[in-house]
Amino acid sequence: MINKPKIAFALSIFFIFFLVYYEIGSYMLCQKHYINKTLLFFSEKAMLATGGYPPRLENIGFVYPPLIFIFFLIFKNPILVVSFLSSALATTILFFTKNVKAVLLFLSAVGLYVSLEDPTYLLLYFVLVLVSYFLFLYKEKAMSLYIFAAGLIFGFSFYLDFTIITLIPLILYAIYKQEKIVEKEKLFSIYIVTITPIFFFAISWLYLNWVFMKDPFYFINSPYSIFHPKSVEAISAKKNIVVSLKLLIAKTLYILPLSLPYFLSLINYIKNKLTFYTAPLYLIYISPIVLMFFDIYFGMYSKGFSDAFGLLFFYVVFEHIISHKKNLILNLSFYLSILLSFVIMPLSSSYNESTFSRALLGMHIKPNTVYYEEAANFLKHKKGKILADDVDDYPVIYFVGNAKRFVLPYQYEFYTVLSSPYNFVDYILVDTSSTKDKVFNFYKSQIPGFKLVYENKMFKIYEKESLH
């Protein structure tokens, strides 16, 4: 029977979270002119997938894990996407744990940042928690439905984070620890049920890369791949176990002030030998650390405190699942971490984290969308086709809001238009700050038949001379 009061209360909580997130997100973009540009990338690719000329689904790209694109295809607006998704996840976790810690976590500085600027990360850890919970239910009730659900959800998680596949040995060992005590003859079939989905989704992704990009490993080999190191530390750590371990230790110490409850609870569980009695759950409890290591090992090392959110998220949920005992030290450390997030996040070495947190606290920031918005506002009030390269200009395409006006590299006629723009387009957008911009690299100086009509610190816009 449907419990209408509970549903009404849940919807009320959802809308409260939604309003908070939407207001903060809108304030960041409209007033502070800041947003994580990855969100604009997702939005632009979703816009091209449904409203490009021609619309092509492969415009979502084969570089980023694709599951998050579904939400951008539905909502288009990045603020609406993150507000809806984060509100739904926050409401679910709050109703599951029935603990004020969940509210505090999502409204902390690190929680607000992850919720509004890095929704893929939030969704990933939500999915990992679901996997853990279904494994726990299987241990408690021995129903095959739960192990099937855990395997299916684990499989889907590949589309959120490609490195999730590295958790397979951990999960298999966790199941082995459990089934060694219960029934050995079930072990192989349980293995198949658990890991077949992730292999299916991984192979499907290889097939899609092969069909559309002619390379099954395009998501790894592409120059825009997330696996290409973007810092000196990431380059030195890639495929180097020793350096990766050193960076993992350094990062763990760096985020320790915001993740102390996680490590204290882990020590407490080991001390009380709970890992032996609640396997596979507490082997999964260390999965965030394992993912941190493999992110570094595969060249995706990044600075910042975002990983602390994943650890705190696991702490809050696992505390509810396993231990309902009140622990003063753990509680105090959690509340301290929440408070410290507002002090430490503005000092983060990550531009996005520090900028978001400083803007949240009303401090001066260096905005990152002003020049994109100015160029887009100029083009919005003009009519005609526009030649551009969205390798770095994707925020402009998103802010203009009409993908059909642009001639972009994914279109077959792009290079024809690039070599003879006068016959095809009315405006040319040149990103002078990008070394990868094909238009800028093709036309280093004046463009024949076009005159410069707009310029800021990042862009030059040329207009066909015959228009006026």
Image: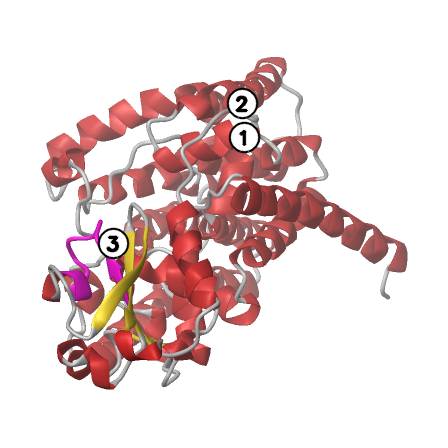
Three-letter amino acid code at disc 3? Ile
Question: Sequence order check: which comes first, mark 1 or mark 3?
Answer: 1
| Image spot of residue 180 (x, y percent) | 38, 48
Q: Does the magenta run of residues contain 431?
A: yes
Which residue is at a point 19% across and 31% down the rendered structure image? Answer: 245
Q: Which residue, given by chain and number where applicable, does mark 3 sit on? A: 226
Residues tagged 1 and 3 counted as in contact (Cβ below 8 A): no
Q: Which residue, given by chain and number where applicable, does mark 2 sit on? A: 342
Q: Which residue, given by chain and number where applicable, does mark 1 sit on? A: 109
Three-letter amino acid code at disc 1? Ala
Three-letter amino acid code at disc 2? Phe
Depth check: 428 or 234 in front? Answer: 428
Depth check: 313 or 48 in front? Answer: 48
| Image spot of residue 386 (x, y percent) | 33, 74
Which residue is at a point 49% across and 52% down the rendered structure image? Answer: 123
**At numbered mark 1, what does the secondary structure look like: helix, strand or loop?**
helix
Q: Does the magenta run of residues contain 296?
A: no
